[in-house]
Image (cartoon, rainbow, N blue to C red):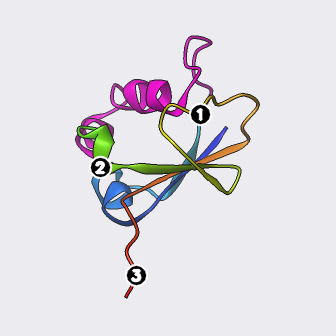
Amino acid sequence: MDLLYFAWVRERIGMGQEQVEPPAEVRSVADLIGWLATRSPGHAEAMRAPERLRAAIDQKFVPLDAPLGAAREVALFPPVTGG
């Protein structure tokens, strides 16, 4: 699975993307966030407050409780505002 990180999420992790193979028990975006938090101190900092994150699976916005299914790409980013 390809992960894409944007804005302060990318800055805290120290990279804009990575490829991972989460364990079988990671079934939702929320599970993925929890698992990612264990990968490094930067990941832990970026994933510290999941309620501040937004996600997209295969370029479609989804809630954090959305199942990953056969996702090829997951993007994590802060809320987007317009103006």
Q: Earlier in the sequence, mark 2 or mark 1?
A: 1
Note whether 80 is above or below 3 in the view shown. below
Where does residue 26 sit, x and y in percent of width and height? Answer: 55, 19
**Label 1 belongs to which residue?**
20
- Residue at 44 percent across and 51 percent down: it is 54
Report the Cα–Cα distance between label 3 and label 2: 17 Å
- Furthest-bottom residue in view? 83
Q: Which image quadrant: the C terminus?
A: bottom left
Q: Are marks 2 and 1 in contact (CB under 8 Å)?
A: no
- 59 left or right of 79 in image: right
Q: Is residue 24 above or below residue 43?
A: above
Q: In screen coordinates, is 3 left or right of 41? A: right
Q: Amino acid at mark 1?
A: Val
User: In the rendered structure, which amino acid carries the disc numbered 3?
Assistant: Gly
Give the CA distance from mark 1 to mark 3. Answer: 31 Å
Q: Quadrant of residue 35?
A: top left
- Crowd tier of the residue under label 2, counting other residues whose Cα lies within 10 Å: few below 14, some 14–19, many 20 or above: few
2 vs 1, front mark: 2
Residue highlighted by disc 2: 52
What residue do we see at 37% from left, 49% from top? 53
Element under label 1? loop
Considering only order in the chain, which callout, 2 or 3, is on the residue closer to the N terminus? Answer: 2
Q: Horizontal and vertical percent for residue 78?
A: 36, 59
**SS of the residue at dot 2?**
helix
- Marker disc for residue 82: 3
Q: Residues within 10 Å of mark 1 (few under 14, many from 20)?
A: few
Q: Earlier in the sequence, mark 1 or mark 3?
A: 1
Give the magenta range.
21-46
